[in-house]
Amino acid sequence: MNASFFHLTDELNVPQIERVSSLQPRLEREASFNKYLYLYPTLPAAYFILNKKGLIVDVNKTGEKLLEKSKNKLVNRCFSFYLTEDYQLLFSRYRQMIFQIKSSDSYVLKFVNHNQLIFFARCNSNIVTNPHNGQEELFITLLDISRA
């Protein structure tokens, strides 16, 4: 075999190796995101996914029950709308901060549902990357602590 054959073989292999290694972060993001989606409808906690603007992208059945609204009435609505007035600005600032520092956190929020009943919920938030569009989203777990 001559030198040009080996050179061509090397050229063909290097881009393939680079493509495989560049896929790795995307595959890891998808696995992480899919883990949440798998658990999403099956656990008793309420789950919400928000975009950077604070709009609800997705919600599970428990979230629908908690806010007493159907999914189609929650999606694309501002999550803060379901907080009491005194917590809306607080959450807005928190949401902006968590997207900047890219960390997870726990806190308590005060909500008002469709029937104007006020309740407190313990919230856990994580930044996740949506593998379908590459956008960072806020994944929130809510547990109603006022009925406990």
Image (cartoon, rainbow, N blue to C red):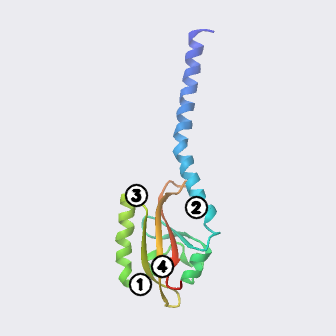
Nearer the camera: disc 3 or disc 4: 4
- Mark 2 and mark 1 lie on one chain; the one further toward the N terminus is 2
> Does residue 55 sit above or below 18 in this rendering?
below
- Mark 4 and mark 2 lie on one chain; the one further toward the N terminus is 2
> Does residue 44 sit above or below 32 in this rendering?
below
Q: Which class describes the residues within 10 Å of circle 2: few (<14), some (14-19), or many (20+)?
A: some
The residue to which callout 4 is attached is 121
Q: Which class describes the residues within 10 Å of circle 1: few (<14), some (14-19), or many (20+)?
A: some
Say which of 7 and 128 sits in front.
128
Q: Are marks 1 and 4 in contact (CB under 8 Å)?
A: no
Inter-mark Cα distance, 1 to 4: 12 Å
Say which quadrant the N terminus sits in. Answer: top right
Nearer the camera: disc 2 or disc 1: 2
Nearer the camera: disc 1 or disc 4: 4
- Mark 3 and mark 2 lie on one chain; the one further toward the N terminus is 2
> Does residue 90 sit above or below 113 in this rendering?
above
Tag of residue 36: 2
Q: Are marks 1 and 3 in contact (CB under 8 Å)?
A: no
Inter-mark Cα distance, 1 to 3: 26 Å
Q: Amino acid at mark 3?
A: Lys
Q: Position of residue 27 (x, y in %)?
A: 57, 47
Q: Amino acid at mark 1?
A: Thr
The residue to which callout 3 is attached is 102
Q: Position of residue 5 (x, y in %)?
A: 60, 14
- SS of the residue under disc 4: strand
Q: Which class describes the residues within 10 Å of circle 4: few (<14), some (14-19), or many (20+)?
A: some
Inter-mark Cα distance, 3 to 2: 17 Å
Tell me the residue at 62%/70% (across/down). Answer: 43
The residue to which callout 1 is attached is 84
